[in-house]
Image (cartoon, rainbow, N blue to C red):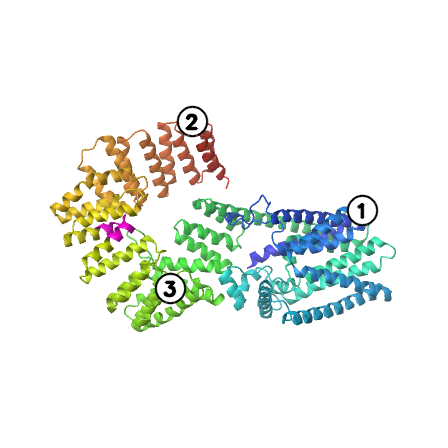
Amino acid sequence: YWGHSFQYVANWGALTLLYLVASYAYRTPEQIHGGAFAFCVAVAAASLYGFLQWAGLDPFPWAEEGMGIYEQLPASFGNPNFAAHALLLSIILNIRLLTTRYQIPATAMLIISLLHLYMTQQRASLLGLAAAAAVLVSAQLAFRYVKRPVTATGAALGLSALIGVAGLGAALTWHHARAGTWYPVDGSLLLRYNSYHGAARMILDQPVTGYGPGNYEIVNANYWTDYEQHWYATQRMFNQNVHNDYLEMAVDAGMPAAALYLAILIFAVGHSLYLAYSAGEDRRRRYLGYTLAAFFTAFAVDSFFGFNLRVPVTAALLFVALGWLEGLHLGAHAPPAAKWLGFRAAAWRVAVVGAALGVAILTTRVYLGETATQRGRGAMYWGIPHAAPAHFTEAERLKPWDWAPSRERAMAHLSLEQPKRALEALRLAEQKNPYYPETLIPLAHTAMAIAVTPPQPGVDSLAAAERMALLQEAKAVARRGIDLCEPAYEFHEIKGKTLAFEAAQLTQDEAAAAELWARVEPHAEKALRYGSPSQGEMFRLMAHARLALGRPDDAEEALTRGVEREPANLSLWRLFLRYAQNQGRFDVFEQAAHTALDRADLPAEARAELHQTLAQTLQQRDGDQERIEEHLLNVCEFAPQSPRTWQLLSGFARESGQTDAIRRGLERAQVGLEGEGTLEAAIVDVLVTAYEGGDPEYVEAVESLRDLSIRAAAGAEAPSPSLHWAADLLVDELAQRNLAEDAAGSVLLRLAKVYFHAHAYDDALQLLASAFPLIEGADRATAFALQAETQLAQGEHEAAVRTLRQAIVEEPGNVHYRAGYARVLAQAGQTEEARAQYEMILDSPELDEESRALLQQEMTALDH
């Protein structure tokens, strides 16, 4: 993962350049005091802002759950770990500033930092302060008894180590006596201990070279402990850092690199003490030496429990402080400059400038890539997913190593119902990070969904071999996911479903199919055990497997438990019915169905399905006619818009001779439709069935509904998508009726809406073409808007633009046309032209205030 690593190498390069600059810029204690003061002011300002956040007075919604696009933005000190690392260093520097000309502001900033550190509840920072105090005490003792600076420095370091070991032992003993364990074991620390365990295993596998800078977050999933696996499975969270700089350094670049990092910090502490010992009568240099020794000690101890080097503020300050130490060593005066530079001096200066420019270019690309990613997220958030893939593609170009833009582009394609494009993007994201469950889950699911989707007429479908290859890919990815995180239920769901689909195809090889079915059940059971929300689906899968393996009693147990857990799962009820029919267990099915119908939380769709099934079951068994009718009337109430409802009722009425059941069904349907419009679909279906039956009395009972059906379709503002078939009948009906032109045009327009909602876009456009010559006024504006919307649904943005341009030509002053035109331009991605249209509309005096506010809001959303 060289691209990902190189980004981190560039960061180290930038920090090294910062160290070099600091070593040349800071040569005196006064200069260092000024730099420390600037840092402490910045930390205090961030802390004050943090207090505003804590008090709920923050004007920026950093953590607002309803505004997901803010999740990736930085909140000042919003993370207590980030805050504590910087506050620890600020406290030490502020203490030094108390004896300088910055005494008064340093006192205030010290109080702020101490209060904020207390609020973070970070114990590692307290250990860092204690260690810094121990080094200063050791230094004073060593300086008192040893006069040679080098020897005194070594003695102070050795005594500090002894005090540290003794203090650690005492703390462990005290904790064991108090709590029964040698060290704290609360939830956050348990996660860290497990991350230490995984990091140690990684180091043992690659002890010399490591895995590359920054690659811990990619590779670590292979080393998750059981605790970390359960943490991800339940919280959907995982460590991106070890929370221990030394272990992470060893993971990044091997144990030699970790040893070098530790040596740098120990050397910095020792050199700072040497500076203090050798300062003579210069109290400023001596105190500064003690301060830097405390600074580096606290940083070194805090690094055992945090990720100081991964936090830009503290990492930068460490390298600046190393530069301070170097500058003090070099002295107040730089060597005299030559009149001209030699080749070697010029070469390394050019190299440094070139490296700095390279780092700047790379990190600027990273920033622009993050910006593009955020724009894509904004497009998703604001409900314009068709604009998101372009932003994510731009982010992929700028940051080709980052898996996040590829994954999020895939999510955008899925929202646009483009599974093949989504699959390509997910495969790309998986190449960049093959161990990221958040990519593996949708990758496996998308591959499976494409593989098991039956071929659609008129749509390019995959060959059988391609479908099986996709199925095998889904299985393989799910298997990898299970190896990474056994408790993640999604992988078991996908694995079980792919095995079941594969087994169902093996109709000629019963032995092989039985072997696959035997592997389905354990995965369904594990998915349930690990908290799958699709409990009904898993029980259905389990029942399928048990039936295929010849275990009907066990299958009945799974079906019964499944409908208890998820009574609204219609697929499960249908399997239950087939089982009851095949095994002669109608009594078990009926008992389970009546139990479910007694539940108050059962949705109307499930109620209708169960009543319909019970009615059909009773009819097949020559059951009580009254009970059958009551079930069918319940179906009319809970599913009044379903054509199947009225086919069943009219069939029952015709066969039983109870034509009055139609009237009772209509009355019950009106109960179910209260506040939801008319019964257009049901009425048309009754009409058709009546004419098919041919019963004169029956025909007379429903003939009066013919005109009502026409009016219902003509007046429905938002017809149901299931009315496509009804619209076909009404179009034929129109051809036989002598309606006035304006009435026919109006009905054609309403029928076009029916076809649009049924996703029959070509039919909708054809009806609109017939309607345009027959309509005028408000209907004409509606027709133009519907035609443009239909063309957009077909992906024909340019055609939609032409439609609305034609509307504007007809009525240039119609603000509704221009508003629709602006919206279409925005959806087509023509932002600037859309803005111009919005500005033109907003200048119109005809707009009321409510419309003006809405249009202003839409124009503002263009920026997102």
First in residue order: circle 1 vs circle 2: 1
Which stretch did the figure color magenta? Answer: 633-646
Q: Is residue 597 left or right of residue 97?
A: left
Q: Quadrant of the N terminus?
A: bottom right
Closer-to-camera residue (764/535): 535
The span from disc 2 to disc 3 (Cα, nearest Å) is 58 Å
**Where in the figure is residue 82, as x and y percent of width and height?**
63, 55
The residue indicated by pointer 3 is: 538
The span from disc 1 to disc 3 (Cα, nearest Å) is 72 Å
Q: Secondary structure at mark 2?
A: loop
**Can you tell which mark lies on residue 846?**
2
Identify the residue at horizontal 24%, vertical 46% (top origin). Answer: 667
Residue type at mark 1: give it.
Arg
Residue type at mark 2: give it.
Glu
Residue 88 sits inside the magenta stretch: no
The residue indicated by pointer 1 is: 101
